[in-house]
Image: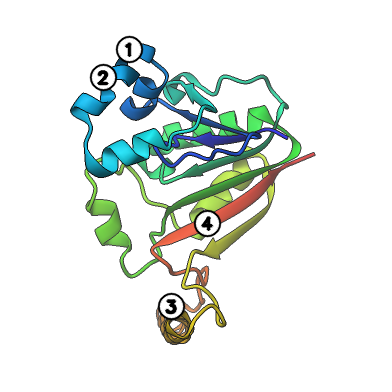
């Protein structure tokens, strides 16, 4: 199995089946012997700790040039907090590139800020590098047009009941907030909307066979 972690930055996975791909400075330093040797001189504290934890399964690559794998060769593609940094046309082309390299039935998993969240506008405008915002319905349509199927959107929290007393309370409070937001949408638009309201949402899809 081959899994790509695109735009990983320092959020890498050490698992052998994963290839972490990014053009970030940290990864470029990690792959360069000379720069790696002088890294302790310029890095301190948490940055140095994260740098030391970077695994060897890294590919330094500028993803604006495409994804450097043959078509129909990858089992799964993951990227988190990357799509919102692309403008709409580029985002569509990037999704096409993800589909190209996946095997038929291969899985795409991504996370992005949620425009349907009550905090959606603050998230979008809180980072000057954000180009576009998606909600679950819009991103689902984009993925469908790109050639994906079995598209499912999910909230990213809170952790369900049973993990701890604190998280159980947070979960129950969140269910009340969700119900209020659905009622708000129903009263204003006549529909409940996507039902996904966390600041960040996760979406999965499969390449059509």
Question: Which residue lies under the disc numbered 2?
Answer: 38
Q: Do residues under tags 3 and 2 come within 8 Å of each other at their CB atoms? A: no
Mark with earlier residue (4, 3): 3
Q: Give the CA separation, mark 4 to mark 2.
A: 38 Å
Between 8 and 57, the one lying in front of the other is: 57
Question: Which residue lies under the disc numbered 3?
Answer: 185
Picture coordinates of residue 31, whole percent (x, y): 42, 19
Question: Which residue lies under the disc numbered 1?
Answer: 34
Question: Which residue lies under the disc numbered 4?
Answer: 202
Q: Nearer the viewer, mark 3 or mark 1?
A: 1
- Quadrant where the N terminus sits is top right
Q: Secondary structure at mark 4?
A: strand
Q: Give the CA separation, mark 4 to mark 3.
A: 21 Å
Q: Do residues under tags 2 and 1 come within 8 Å of each other at their CB atoms? A: yes
Picture coordinates of residue 160, whole percent (x, y): 55, 77
Q: Residue at x 51, y 27 (%)?
A: 56
Mark with earlier residue (3, 1): 1
Picture coordinates of residue 76, whole percent (x, y): 66, 39
Q: Residue at x 62, y 21 (%)?
A: 69
Between 33 and 24, the one lying in front of the other is: 33
């Amino acid at each position: 199995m081959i899994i790509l972690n695109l735009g990983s930055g320092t959020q890498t996975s050490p698992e052998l089946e994963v290839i972490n791909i990014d053009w970030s400075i940290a990864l470029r330093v990690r792959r360069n012997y000379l720069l790696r040797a002088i890294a302790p001189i310029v890095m301190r504290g948490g940055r140095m700790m994260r740098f030391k934890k970077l695994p060897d399964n890294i590919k330094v690559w500028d993803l604006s040039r495409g994804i450097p794998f043959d078509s129909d060769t990858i089992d799964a593609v993951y990227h988190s907090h990357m799509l919102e940094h692309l403008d709409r046309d580029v985002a569509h082309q990037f999704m096409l590139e993800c589909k190209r390299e996946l095997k038929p039935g291969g899985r795409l998993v991504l996370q992005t800020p949620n425009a349907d969240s009550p905090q959606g506008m603050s998230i979008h405008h809180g980072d000057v590098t954000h180009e576009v915002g998606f909600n679950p319905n819009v991103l689902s349509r984009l993925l469908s047009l790109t050639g994906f199927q079995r598209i499912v959107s999910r909230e990213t929290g809170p952790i369900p009941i049973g993990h701890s007393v604190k998280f159980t309370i947070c979960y129950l409070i969140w269910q009340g907030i969700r119900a209020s937001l659905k009622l708000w949408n129903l009263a204003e638009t006549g529909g409940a909307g996507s039902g996904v309201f966390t600041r960040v949402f996760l979406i999965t899809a499969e390449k059509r066979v």
